């Protein structure tokens, strides 16, 4: 038996500690959080989902600004952009907002039998829809602020380039890209759930989330800001042509396929596998009291 096995469980001892949670403790925390999230009232899920989509979009906005700034070289923007993109995700997670991709971890609660398929599907549907509303809201405010057209339209041009690239993959490729995207995001969240402070969570999330745009992987909520900012070029007065592949139909198809990949990547490869490794034969009290 190791020293860590012999020591009291820091999550139940009540003593202050800086030790990270053990993997089986993380699994319990993820399961309990999944049960709690799936049983939120609809209004709470929608409001927190709106905030989640808004925060992710703010991070994507920051990334676009760096990548399109005329005084920042392409290589520097490619390195710094994803890191600042990750900040939006970190704000959303630490502030308690709801994000479709991280909520895919509630598949662990489903595997345990603590919640029903209907409860999980209801939560994911509400969060995905409200994430979309949050993204649309931020894009609309950003466009009418006048800042979106700075750098002689380079910022929107960058959004169009990114969007066209995201939409250029076959359906199978898009699903696989979505799998990789949420494997990284949910593994980052898993690491963050091991931490006991805001600093722990920030550091744990930063690199895995930044790796998603850096490696051109995709997650549905993260795609929304660039897609809708590109679409808004149809508004009179912008003066920028929209690539042929960027249409409402192609965007809707992408979001569906990426969401499927995200569910597989986060819900199966992270949540379900870790459930069978750590919790399959363990009875966990969900403790969902308010």
Image (cartoon, helix red, strand yellow):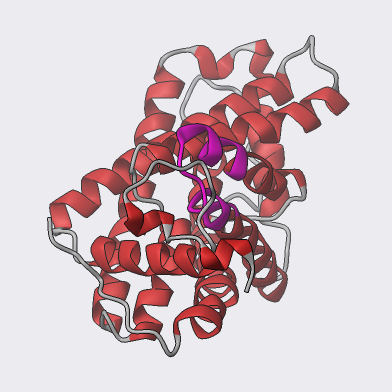
Residue 52 appears left or right of 215: left
Query: Which residue ends up furthest to the bottom in the rendered image?
Result: 281
Q: Quadrant of the N terminus?
A: bottom right
Is 193 magenta? The answer is yes
The percent position of residue 114, horizontal first and vertical second, equals 27, 81
Type of secondary structure dominating the magenta stretch: helix
The percent position of residue 89, horizontal first and vertical second, equals 50, 40
The percent position of residue 203, horizontal first and vertical second, equals 61, 37
Q: Is residue 29 above or below residue 119?
A: above
Q: Residue 163 sits in which quadrant?
A: top right
Residue 160 appears left or right of 191: right
* Relative depth, front residue between 100 and 227: 100
* Relative depth, front residue between 7 and 216: 7
The magenta stretch is 188-204
Q: Residue at x 73, y 63 (%)?
A: 169
Q: Quadrant of the C terminus?
A: bottom left
Is 19 magenta? The answer is no
Visible residue check, residue 258: no
Q: Is residue 111 above or below residue 140?
A: below
Q: Residue at x 41, y 39 (%)?
A: 94
Q: Residue at x 77, y 25 (%)?
A: 77
Q: Residue 53 sits in which quadrant?
A: top left
Q: Residue at x 32, y 77 (%)?
A: 284
Residue 216 appears left or right of 226: right
């Amino acid at each position: 038996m190791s020293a860590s096995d012999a020591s009291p469980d820091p999550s139940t001892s009540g003593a202050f500690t800086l030790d990270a949670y053990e993997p089986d403790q993380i699994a319990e925390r993820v399961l309990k959080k999944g049960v709690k999230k799936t049983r939120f009232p609809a209004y709470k899920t929608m409001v927190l989902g709106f905030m989640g989509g808004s925060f992710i979009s703010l991070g994507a906005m920051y990334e676009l600004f760096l990548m399109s700034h005329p005084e920042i070289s392409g290589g520097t923007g490619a390195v710094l952009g994803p890191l600042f993109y990750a900040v939006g995700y970190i704000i959303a997670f630490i502030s308690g907002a709801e994000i479709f991709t991280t909520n895919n971890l509630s598949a662990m609660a489903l595997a345990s039998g603590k919640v029903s398929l209907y409860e999980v599907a209801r939560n994911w549907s509400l969060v995905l829809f409200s994430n979309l509303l949050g993204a649309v809201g931020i894009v609309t405010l950003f466009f009418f602020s006048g800042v979106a057209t700075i750098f002689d339209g380079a910022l929107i041009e960058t959004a169009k380039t990114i969007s066209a690239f995201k939409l250029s993959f076959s359906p199978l490729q898009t699903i696989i890209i979505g799998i990789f995207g949420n494997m990284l995001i949910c593994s980052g969240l898993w690491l963050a759930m091991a931490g006991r402070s805001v600093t722990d969570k920030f550091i744990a999330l930063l690199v895995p989330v930044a790796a998603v745009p850096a490696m051109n992987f995709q997650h549905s909520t993260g795609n929304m800001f660039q897609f809708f900012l590109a679409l808004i070029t149809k508004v009179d007065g912008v003066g920028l042509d929209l690539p042929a592949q960027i249409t409402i139909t192609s965007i809707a198809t992408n979001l569906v396929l990426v969401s499927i990949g995200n569910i597989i990547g986060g819900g199966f490869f992270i949540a379900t596998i870790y459930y069978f490794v750590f919790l399959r034969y363990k009875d966990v009290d969900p403790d969902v009291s308010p």
